C-alpha cells in the first residue's frame, strides 16, 4: 500500500515537472542554447501568481497562462536584445551569457521580494481525494493537470500551426528555412518566448503547492536539466516521459534514502545517464 | 624577450614590495588575485586549449578545500595537506574525465556543471565526516595575523606561478598540440592518430590539480568552509569570465583577466553591497555581447576609438 502511495505521489507531480522542463527543452532544442535563466523565470512566474492571489484573489491555476503571457513578452524582449546577437556562438559564450542574465534577475528578485519563503494559502483549502488508504492532494492534481494541458498545447502548436512548423523548420535547417521565407530571427525570438511562457506558467502552478523564494531557482533549473536528459532533448513526448519519470524517481528516492537527498539522486542519475545514454530514454527524435 | 624579462623582474619587485609593505587589506587582495589567476589559468588548460566548456571548477575547488581542510584537521602538516588535496582532486578528475569527457558541447557543459551540485549535496549529507551544512573549521596556522597573510600570499602565488609554468609547458609539449587539434576538430585529430581521450583526461587532471590545491589553501586561509561557499557555481563561472576578458587559449590572457576581474569586482563591491551580483551579471552580459574576444581586441587603439568601436558593434 505504501508503495502505491509513493508511486501516486510521484505521478501527481509528473505533469507539473513536464511543464517545468518543456520550455527549457524547447529553447535548448531550437535555439541550441542552455537557458540558465529558466529557473529564475519559473520563480518570477511564481511571484506573479502570489501577488495576483494576494491582491485580487485570483486562483493560481487559472492565473498560470496569464503569468505565462507576461513572461512571454519579457522573454521576447530578452531574446531580441541579449540573446539574438550570440545565436550560433559556441556553448561557452551562450551559457556564460544566460548565466549573467540569471545573476541579474536573481539579484533583482532577491532585492525586490526578499529571500524568505512565501506561500499561497488557498481559501478554502482544496483538501484531498481518498481512495481507501491512498491519499491524493487535490492541489497537486490540478497543478499537474494544468501543467500537462499546457505542455500538450505546446506540442499541438508545434505540430499543427504554421508558427509551430516554422519553429521546427528552423530547428532542422536554419538556412533552408530562411530560403523558404521564414523570418529566422523572429522565429528564434518566439521560440524563446514560448519557453519563458512555459516557465512562467510552471512557476504559477508551483506557487500553488510549494512555498516560493528567489533562492529556489537553482533547484528548478536542475530539475529541468534532469528531465531533459531523462526524456531526451527536444521532444514533447520526451519531456512528458521525463517529467513523470523524475516525479516517481524522486518520490521513491525520498522513501529509501530520505527526502533531503532527492535532488542529489536525480543529479547522480543525470550523470549516469549522460555517461551511458546521452540521447535519453526515448532516444533522439526532435520536434517533428 | 627583453620585454618578458623586464615584466618578470617588475612583477618580482612588486611582489616583494607587497610582502614588505602591504597592509592586510592589500595582502588579501593580492592573495585573491593569485587565487583567481590560478583558477583561470587552470581552467584555460581545458576550456581554452581543448575548447571543452568545463563548468567543473567549483567541484574541484570545493573538493580540494574539503580534502585539505579535513587532512589538516587530522593533523597532517599543512603544506602536505595542500598538495595531498590537489592530488586527491586530480585522481577524482581523472575518474570523472573518463566518464564525461566523451560528451561534447552542451552535454559536457551540463555534465560538468552538475558535478559540483552532487558533491555539495554529498558534503551536506555526510555530516559525520564533513560537518554537513554547519561547515568545517579548519585549524588556524600559528603566528601573527600579518605573518599569516604573508604566508598565504606566498603559497597562493607559488601555485599560480606553477600553474602558469605548467600551462607554458603544455603549450609547447605534444599534449598542447593534441589539445589544440581537439579544439579545432576532434574527429580529424583522432584520424591523424592523436589519442584524444588520453590527452583530454590528462589536461583535465592537470587542470584540477591546481584548482584543488588552490581550494585547499583557501580553506586554511579563511579557516572556515561550508558547502554552499566552496561549491558555489560562481567559482565555475568567474574563471571563464577572466579568461574571456584576457583572451581564451592564451598563456597570459587568464592572468591579465584575473587582475582586471578583481579590479572590477572590488569596484562593484564598494559601490553596491546589496546589488553586487546583479551588476556582476550585467558586466558578464556586456562582456559577451560587446567584447567577446576579450580586452585584446582593444589593443593598439586609442581609448576613444575603442569605445566607438564597442558601441558600433552593439547589436541592434
Image (cartoon, grey):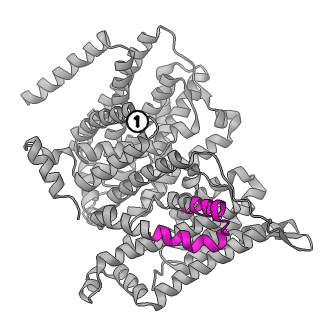
Q: Nearer the viewer, residue A54 or A260?
A: A54
Read off the magenta span.
A45-72
**Rendering coords of residue A254 (x, y %):** 74, 57
Disc 1: host chain: B
**Rendering coords of residue B224 (x, y %):** 56, 26
Q: Is residue A21 visible?
A: no
Dominant secondary structure (helix, strand or loop) of the stretch shown in magenta: helix
What residue is disc 1 on? B272
Q: Quadrant of the N terminus of chain A?
A: bottom right
Please tell me whether mark 1 sits on a helix, a strand or a loop: loop
Task: Give me the residue at 73% from left, 73% from top.
Answer: A141
What is the residue that sits farthest to the right in this orientation? A132
Task: Give me the residue at 38% from left, 48% from top.
Answer: B281
Residue A152 is one of the magenta-drawn residues: no
**Looking at the image, residue B125 lies above or below residue B186:** above
Task: Give me the residue at 43% from left, 71% from top.
Answer: A193
What is the residue that sits farthest to the front in this orientation? A56
**Looking at the image, residue B110 lies above or below residue B120:** below
Amino acid at each position: 500500500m505504501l508503495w502505491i502511495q509513493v508511486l501516486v505521489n510521484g505521478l501527481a507531480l509528473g505533469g507539473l515537472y513536464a511543464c517545468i522542463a518543456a520550455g527549457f527543452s524547447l529553447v535548448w532544442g531550437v535555439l541550441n542554447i542552455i537557458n540558465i535563466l529558466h529557473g529564475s523565470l519559473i520563480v518570477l512566474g511564481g511571484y506573479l501568481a502570489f501577488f495576483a492571489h494576494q491582491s485580487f484573489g485570483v486562483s493560481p491555476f487559472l492565473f498560470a497562462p496569464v503569468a505565462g503571457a507576461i513572461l512571454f513578452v519579457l522573454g521576447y524582449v530578452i531574446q531580441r536584445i541579449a540573446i539574438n546577437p550570440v545565436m550560433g556562438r559556441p556553448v561557452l559564450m551562450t551559457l556564460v551569457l544566460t548565466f549573467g542574465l540569471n545573476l541579474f534577475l536573481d539579484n533583482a528578485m532577491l532585492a525586490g521580494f526578499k529571500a524568505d519563503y512565501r506561500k499561497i494559502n488557498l481559501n478554502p483549502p482544496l483538501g484531498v481525494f481518498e481512495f481507501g488508504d491512498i491519499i491524493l492532494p487535490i492541489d497537486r492534481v490540478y497543478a499537474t493537470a494544468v501543467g500537462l494541458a499546457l505542455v500538450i498545447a505546446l506540442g499541438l502548436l508545434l505540430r499543427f500551426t504554421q508558427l509551430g512548423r516554422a519553429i521546427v523548420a528552423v530547428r532542422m535547417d536554419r538556412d533552408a528555412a530562411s530560403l523558404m521565407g521564414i523570418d529566422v530571427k523572429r522565429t528564434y525570438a518566439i521560440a524563446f518566448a514560448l519557453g519563458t511562457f512555459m516557465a512562467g506558467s510552471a512557476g504559477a502552478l508551483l506557487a500553488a503547492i510549494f512555498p516560493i523564494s528567489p533562492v529556489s531557482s537553482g533547484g528548478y533549473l536542475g530539475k529541468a536539466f534532469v528531465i531533459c536528459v531523462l526524456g531526451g532533448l527536444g521532444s514533447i513526448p520526451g519531456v512528458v516521459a521525463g517529467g513523470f519519470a523524475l516525479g516517481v524517481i524522486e518520490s521513491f528516492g525520498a522513501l529509501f534514502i530520505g527526502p533531503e537527498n532527492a535532488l542529489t539522486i536525480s543529479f547522480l542519475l543525470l550523470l549516469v545517464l549522460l555517461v551511458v545514454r546521452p540521447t535519453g530514454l526515448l532516444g533522439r527524435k526532435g520536434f517533428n | 624577450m627583453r620585454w618578458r624579462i623586464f615584466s618578470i623582474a617588475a612583477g618580482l619587485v612588486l611582489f616583494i614590495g607587497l610582502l614588505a609593505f602591504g597592509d592586510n587589506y592589500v595582502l588579501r587582495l593580492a592573495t585573491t588575485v593569485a587565487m583567481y589567476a590560478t583558477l583561470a589559468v587552470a581552467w584555460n588548460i581545458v576550456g581554452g586549449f581543448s575548447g571543452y566548456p568545463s563548468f567543473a571548477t567549483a567541484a574541484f575547488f570545493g573538493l580540494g578545500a574539503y580534502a585539505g581542510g579535513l587532512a589538516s584537521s587530522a593533523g597532517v602538516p599543512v603544506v602536505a595537506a595542500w598538495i595531498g588535496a590537489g592530488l586527491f582532486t586530480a585522481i577524482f578528475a581523472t575518474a570523472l574525465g573518463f566518464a564525461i569527457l566523451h560528451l561534447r558541447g552542451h552535454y559536457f557543459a551540463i555534465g560538468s556543471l552538475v558535478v559540483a551540485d552532487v558533491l555539495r549535496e554529498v558534503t551536506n549529507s555526510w555530516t559525520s565526516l564533513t560537518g554537513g551544512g554547519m561547515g568545517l573549521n579548519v585549524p588556524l596556522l600559528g603566528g601573527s595575523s600579518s605573518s599569516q597573510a604573508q604566508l598565504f600570499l606566498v603559497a597562493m602565488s607559488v601555485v599560480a606561478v606553477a600553474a602558469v609554468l605548467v600551462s607554458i609547458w603544455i603549450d609547447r609539449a605534444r599534449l598542447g598540440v593534441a589539445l589544440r587539434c581537439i579544439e579545432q576538430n576532434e574527429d580529424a585529430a583522432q584520424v591523424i592518430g592523436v589519442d584524444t581521450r588520453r590527452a583530454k583526461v590528462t589536461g583535465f587532471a592537470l587542470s584540477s590539480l591546481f584548482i584543488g590545491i588552490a581550494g585547499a589553501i583557501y580553506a586554511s586561509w579563511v579557516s572556515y568552509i561550508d558547502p554552499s561557499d566552496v561549491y558555489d557555481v560562481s567559482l565555475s563561472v568567474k574563471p571563464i569570465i577572466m579568461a574571456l576578458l584576457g583572451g581564451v587559449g592564451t598563456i597570459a590572457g587568464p592572468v591579465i583577466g584575473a587582475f582586471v576581474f578583481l579590479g572590477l569586482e572590488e569596484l562593484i563591491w564598494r559601490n553596491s553591497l546589496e546589488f553586487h551580483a546583479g551588476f556582476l551579471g550585467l558586466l558578464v552580459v556586456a562582456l559577451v555581447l560587446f567584447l567577446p574576444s576579450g580586452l585584446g581586441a582593444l589593443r593598439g587603439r586609442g581609448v576613444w576609438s575603442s569605445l566607438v568601436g564597442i558601441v558600433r558593434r552593439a547589436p541592434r
